[in-house]
Image (cartoon, rainbow, N blue to C red):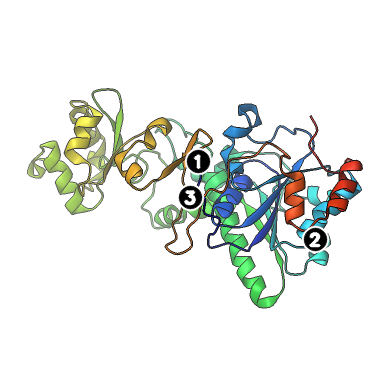
């Protein structure tokens, strides 16, 4: 159910979100859960952004903040956006480089109105470079960062959904960059531009792997490394019922426990880190795991130091006993979704509201940000605000 709490560690921080797809909305969902006062500026008519094909309720990355419909081609629409930005701690630009400048909402214009503004720019390739103007998606950004090549089977890379580039290398780095710059602006009184590139963020997520590669401990051959499924003790195995379990017994003492639960005598086996024997050990482990169902293996291994967990689907995750005990998932407006994270002991995050219909709070949100009834009426009459289509 929706939390009634309206606080959070970012209470009092004001952010203007220019509507976009993928990582920018997720970043804003995170910040809104933490209490930031965010207003999302949507287009007046559908632009086919995000998950509109699935319905407005389904795009829960839009949760927790109101939607204001603005005509970005109308001078009064741009003036409205600038008046909001003038009050904000940060603005989020999810467009290709140069689009906001052409609209009259570029960094120079916005910082002239609000010297302490943090201007967060979210793109796949960054604001400059040979690819800056090219279209792309997560799969492309993590391709040039080296990350996609490392994920998959021995035969070919497999896209890890869009969580590594878009959501990890994009949304999380944007949130971190915005908050760092907001803290700095409170000390200096000066804003700045934060340039987030998903390609670069995804590379940073693989920092440890780059270190291993440079030291000669990471091979470009997939399924031959300790963390990519090559090691028999860090891998997913199929069970008797066609489901899967995950094993991560890297440490020697955890590996010894795993062998004991599998009924294997370490004296009869090769050394754990003998890479030449990993393919043989994978086959041995696979044969054993296929002898019992996923639930049976859970009864044997879950909660031990083996480093074990069942591989759950999205539809199963909310019902796992650990997730239920921690209220890790919430149901809002009939949609099961992850609850706010991380957790704060004194200023807890909360889901303020489900995703709104596009432009549904245009008048309400503008009034909350100080627009008079007369001004709102003028903007509506000029068709500069309000949803169409």
- Give me the residue at 80% from left, 61% from top: 110
**Which residue, as the protein is rendered here, is positioned at the far bottom?**
187
| Quadrant where the C terminus is found in the figure | top right
Pick whichever, 383 or 338, lies toward us: 383
Gap between marks 1 and 2, in whole Å? Answer: 37 Å
Gap between marks 3 and 2, in whole Å? Answer: 31 Å
Q: Is residue 383 left or right of residue 205?
A: right
SS assignment at label 3: loop
Query: Residue 111, which numbered label?
Result: none
Gap between marks 1 and 3, in whole Å? Answer: 28 Å
Judge depth for marks 1 and 2 and give the one in front: 2
Q: Position of residue 231 (x, y in %)?
A: 29, 42
Judge depth for marks 1 and 3 and give the one in front: 3
- Give me the residue at 63% from left, 64% from top: 12
Q: Position of residue 57 (x, y in %)?
A: 59, 33
Query: Residue 148, which numbered label?
Result: 1
Mark 1 or mark 3: whose residue is earlier in sequence: 1
Query: Residue 340, which numbered label?
Result: 3
């Amino acid at each position: 159910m929706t939390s009634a709490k309206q606080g959070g560690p970012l209470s009092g921080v004001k952010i203007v979100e220019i509507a976009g797809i993928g990582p920018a909305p997720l970043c804003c969902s995170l910040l809104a859960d933490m209490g930031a006062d965010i207003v999302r500026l949507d287009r007046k008519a559908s632009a086919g952004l995000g998950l509109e094909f699935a319905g407005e309720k389904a795009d829960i990355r839009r949760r927790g903040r109101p939607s204001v419909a603005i005509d970005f081609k109308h001078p009064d629409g741009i003036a409205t956006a600038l008046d909001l930005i003038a009050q904000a701690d940060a603005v989020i630009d999810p467009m290709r480089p140069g689009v906001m400048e052409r609209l009259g909402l570029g960094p120079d214009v916005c910082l002239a109105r609000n010297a302490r503004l943090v201007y967060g720019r979210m793109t796949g390739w960054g604001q400059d470079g040979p690819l800056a103007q090219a279209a792309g998606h997560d799969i492309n950004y993590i391709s040039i960062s080296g990350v996609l090549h490392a994920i998959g089977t021995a035969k070919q890379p497999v896209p890890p959904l869009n969580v590594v580039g878009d959501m990890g290398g994009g949304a999380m780095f944007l949130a971190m960059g915005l908050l760092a710059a907001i803290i700095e602006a409170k000390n200096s009184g000066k804003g700045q531009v934060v340039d987030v590139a998903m390609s670069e963020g995804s590379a940073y997520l693989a920092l440890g792997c780059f270190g291993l590669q440079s030291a000669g401990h990471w091979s470009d051959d997939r399924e031959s490394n300790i963390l990519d499924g090559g090691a028999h003790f860090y891998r997913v195995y199929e069970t008797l019922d066609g489901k899967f379990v995950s094993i991560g017994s890297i440490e020697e003492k955890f590996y010894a426990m795993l062998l004991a639960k599998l009924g294997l005598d370490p004296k009869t086996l090769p050394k754990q880190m003998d890479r030449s024997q990993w393919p043989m050990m994978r086959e041995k482990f696979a044969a054993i795991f296929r002898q019992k169902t996923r639930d049976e293996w859970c009864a044997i291994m879950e909660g031990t130091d083996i480093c074990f967990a069942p591989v759950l689907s999205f539809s199963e995750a909310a019902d796992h006993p650990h997730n239920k005990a921690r209220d890790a998932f919430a149901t809002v407006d009939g949609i099961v979704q992850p609850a706010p994270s991380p957790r704060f002991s004194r200023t807890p995050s909360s889901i303020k509201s489900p995703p709104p219909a596009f432009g549904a709070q245009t008048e309400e949100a503008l009034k909350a940000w100080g627009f008079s009834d007369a001004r709102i009426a003028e903007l509506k009459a000029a068709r500069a605000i309000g949803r169409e289509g």
